[in-house]
Amino acid sequence: MSKKIGPLAKLHGKDKFTVIAMSAIPLVIVGVFVWIPALCTVILSFSNWDGIGGLRDIHFVGIQNYIDMFTIYPPFWPALWHNVIWLLVLFFIFTPLGMFLAVLLDKELKLTKFYQTSLYLPVVLSAALIGFIWQLMYSRDQGFINAIFGTQIDWYGDPNINLYAAIIANGWRHVGYIMLLYLAGLKGVDPALKEAAALDGASPTRTFFQIIFPVLRPVNILLLVITFIEGLRAFDIVWIINKGRNGLELISTLVTSNVVGEASRIGFGSALATIMLIMSSIFIVIQLRIMLKGEN
């Protein structure tokens, strides 16, 4: 009985070395820059380390950080709820809006390139500049919005509305990103599918939802992943506004406040970061199951 030879065994010399290197180098990079820091974060979450001293000064306290987080740390539950709201608004409003704009631009309207550039422009702007632009829009005394409606609303200062004001500012950038990705996916769809649907008398709406949308399943999953990541990593604009306080608490801002703030509570901040890691891991598992189910 002949012994089966694996694909790698058939290679010789430089070819085998190249294949091994191309496989090992990404694994090393991911391990060093992703998994090792993540593992260290989880380990530190069970300590009360304040960042002073070496490894010998780390004292482990079990799950006390998590108990304190859930019971006696007032900002945690509002921050978690704000992250959920942020994610839901992106998912149900701004992501579909970006997809809708991509479908419109795919029809080769007049000035399509101009519209693409205009919608994508916020994506290339820095978070600081976006915060400044929307500060001009939201300013209570000289803001563009208050000037139009004749109001004196403190959009960033009122804890009842400042979260939604920040989400809109972030959504302005998110729409352009989603639009560009989905437009690229639409350009890759075989035109014969649209032509066949038109010959069968299908309306543009029916063609999209019954033919184009299923074909773009990998792109749809990618947009879902991006939206979830944006909802979790929401940080920059909120931190620029007021460092995540007074109604703008997010898990990411709480992590930063505890890790690099005056208190320097590395252990407690690591526990907060671990919560974000768990939330991300749950979504990644669900995403992988969907992708694997689609391939079977």
Image (cartoon, rainbow, N blue to C red):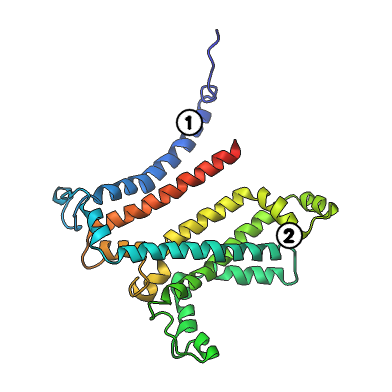
The 10 Å Cα crowd at callout 1, few under 14, some 14 to 19, many 20 or more, is few
Q: Which residue is mark 1?
A: 17
Give residue 188's position: percent from left, percent from top.
69, 52
Locate residue 81 relative to residue 136 in the image: left or right: left
Which residue is at 22% across, 68% downward? 262
On-image quarter of the C terminus: top right
Q: Is residue 2 above or below residue 47?
A: above
SS for tag 1? helix
The amino acid at mark 1 is Phe
Locate residue 212 relative to residue 283 in the image: left or right: right
The residue nearer to you, when weighing 262 against 26, is 262
The amino acid at mark 2 is Thr
Quarter location, residue 100: bottom right
For residue 205, which numbered disc appears in the image? 2
The 10 Å Cα crowd at callout 2, few under 14, some 14 to 19, many 20 or more, is few
Select label 2 or label 1 by which is in front: 2
Residue 267 seen by the camera:
no
Tell me how far mark 2 sits from mark 1, CA to CA: 52 Å
